[in-house]
């Protein structure tokens, strides 16, 4: 025996209880979050949108900065470099090396937000791996938790 209860026969629910379960389910459906307009008209919100709004409100109440940007939004090189926290010239060099896709509007480079976010995720994952590798190397050498000597230790 694996410690779990095994059920060989399906659970039979009496018709009366099935009706109660259905009524409860319908109440839950009616109880979903709703958006109420100034005219009093209501719109049910999908659970995913409701969860998003809760997280948005929580972040804002904690003083965090929040931006909502569509994937298809295009950015100038200045806007994109600011989003990545790098200089415009460094960003232009990334474009020239083909590390981030871009297109031209006239003579001006433009990038999609989705491409900036993809690059940022890749860059952040790479940085995380480097840090993890450094920690692992220190653990392997036995120096990870060794504190450097202080002035009090040397004098």
Image (tube, helix red, strand yellow):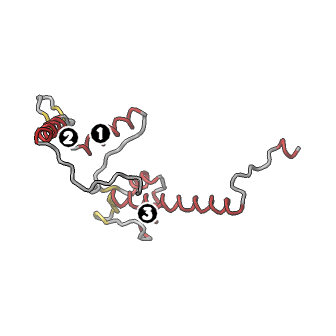
Front residue of 99/103: it is 99
Q: Residues within 10 Å of mark 1 (few under 14, many from 20)?
A: few
Question: Are the residues at dot 2 and dot 3 in contact (C-beta closer than 8 Å)?
Answer: no
Mark 2–mark 3 Cα distance, whole angstroms, equals 41 Å
* Residue 8 drawn at (x, y percent): 26, 56
Q: Mark 1 points at which residue?
A: 53
Chain-order first, disc 2 or disc 3: 2
* Residue 118 drawn at (x, y percent): 38, 60
Please identify the quadrant where the N terminus is shown.
bottom left
Question: Are the residues at dot 1 and dot 2 in contact (C-beta closer than 8 Å)?
Answer: yes
With 104 as the anchor, is 90 left or right in this view? right
Front residue of 82/41: it is 41
With 144 as the anchor, is 65 left or right in this view? left
Q: How crowded is mark 2: few (under 14 residues within 10 Å), some or many (20 or more)?
A: few
Q: Name the residue under label 3.
A: 92
Badge 1 element:
helix
Q: Residues within 10 Å of mark 3 (few under 14, many from 20)?
A: some
Please identify the quadrant where the C terminus is shown.
top right
152 above or below 3? above
Residue 86 got which mark? Answer: none
Residue at horizontal 33 percent and vertical 58 percent from the top:
114
Among all residues in the image, which is located at the extreme right?
Answer: 155
Q: Name the residue under label 2.
A: 45
């Amino acid at each position: 025996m694996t410690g779990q209860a095994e059920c060989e026969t399906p659970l039979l629910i009496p018709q009366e209880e099935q009706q109660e379960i259905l009524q409860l389910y319908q109440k839950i459906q009616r109880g979903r979050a709703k958006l109420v307009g100034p005219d009093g008209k209501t719109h049910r919100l999908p659970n995913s949108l409701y969860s998003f709004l809760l997280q948005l409100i929580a972040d804002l109440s904690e003083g965090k900065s929040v931006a909502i940007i569509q994937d298809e939004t295009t950015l100038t090189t200045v806007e994109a470099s600011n989003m990545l926290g790098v200089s415009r010239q460094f960003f232009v060099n990334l474009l020239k090396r083909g590390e981030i896709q871009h297109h031209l509007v006239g003579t001006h480079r433009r990038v999609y937000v989705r491409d900036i976010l993809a690059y940022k995720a890749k860059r952040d994952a790479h940085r995380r791996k480097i840090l993890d590798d450094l920690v692992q190397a220190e653990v392997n050498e036995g120096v990870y938790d060794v504190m450097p000597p202080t002035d009090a230790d040397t004098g």
